[in-house]
Amino acid sequence: MSAPRLRLGVNVDHIATVRNARGGALPDPVRGALLAIEAGADGITAHLREDRRHIRDEDIARLMASISKPLNFEMAATEEMIGLAIKTKPHAACLVPEKRSERTTEGGLDVIGGHDHVRDATARLKAAGIRVSLFIEPSVDALEAAASIGAPVVELHTGSWCEAVSEGSAHAEHEFERIRVAAAKASELGLECHAGHGLDYATAKRIAGLPQIVELNIGHFLMGEALFVGLPQAIRTMRKAMDAGRPKAPWWTTPER
């Protein structure tokens, strides 16, 4: 058995960011989602923030009605968002931390300090038939807390590693090792393991080499590339990078020398 095919989830938030900068209806994140799926995306991610700075409620409704692939609804574990998710019933809900002051998600969900609250939110979403994932730091403690909460999926925050790579920091290898260990621990705990935040072609290719990770969620980089090469081409190039980095032989064996 080889490593499973690595899925690509495309986050369309920043199509909505451009739209909202001027107002009106364009560019349309639903059109972006349809183009992404046509180009090879396995799913669509959209984060409905409390302040509605990019994705809006009507975008979620239109995505649910329009796309043929699963919708991953990123959300804070608030009463408002839990209610919206239960009403909308997306394929998946990814619980993420959220602060009004941040430009983007700055780290993983506090599944240790906020354990009971996250556990209750997870139980309510699961009862509605929604697959729940937790966006967490790549640490053994966070993974063990996530497992005890009862979510079947974790998404490892790759932002610290990607930032270190971008800056040429010697700390980058330490950060990648944290992700490698966390992915292995997730598998040991029986958790489906995803990863995302800050990934580009090079970092996606490298992280694809970790066979326990079965899905990458990428948005900002792809939308930036789309300005220059178009969204379908950016997604096809990302898909090639991911496939190139994926182990081709059974990952538990050592090649003969």
Image (cartoon, rainbow, N blue to C red):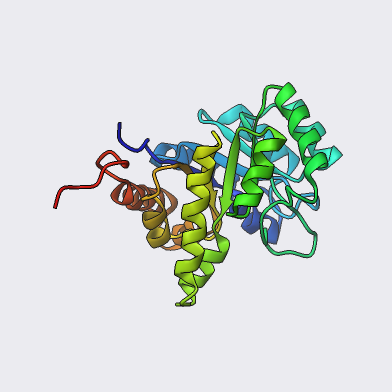
Q: Is residue 80 above or below residue 181?
A: above
Residue 172 x, y percent position in the rendering:
47, 70
- In this view, which residue lies farthest toward the right? 79
* Residue 20 in view: yes
Residue sitting nearer the eye, 162 or 188: 188
Q: Is residue 25 above or below residue 178?
A: above
Residue 171 x, y percent position in the rendering:
50, 73
* Residue 216 in view: no
Position of 231 compared to 104: left or right? left
Residue 132 x, y percent position in the rendering:
65, 34
Position of 160 compared to 19: left or right? left
Q: Residue at x 44, y 42 (%)?
A: 212
Q: Residue at x 36, y 50 (%)?
A: 209
Residue 85 x, y percent position in the rendering:
74, 32
Position of 44 compared to 141: left or right? left
Residue sitting nearer the eye, 184 or 80: 184
Q: Is residue 139 above or below residue 187?
A: below
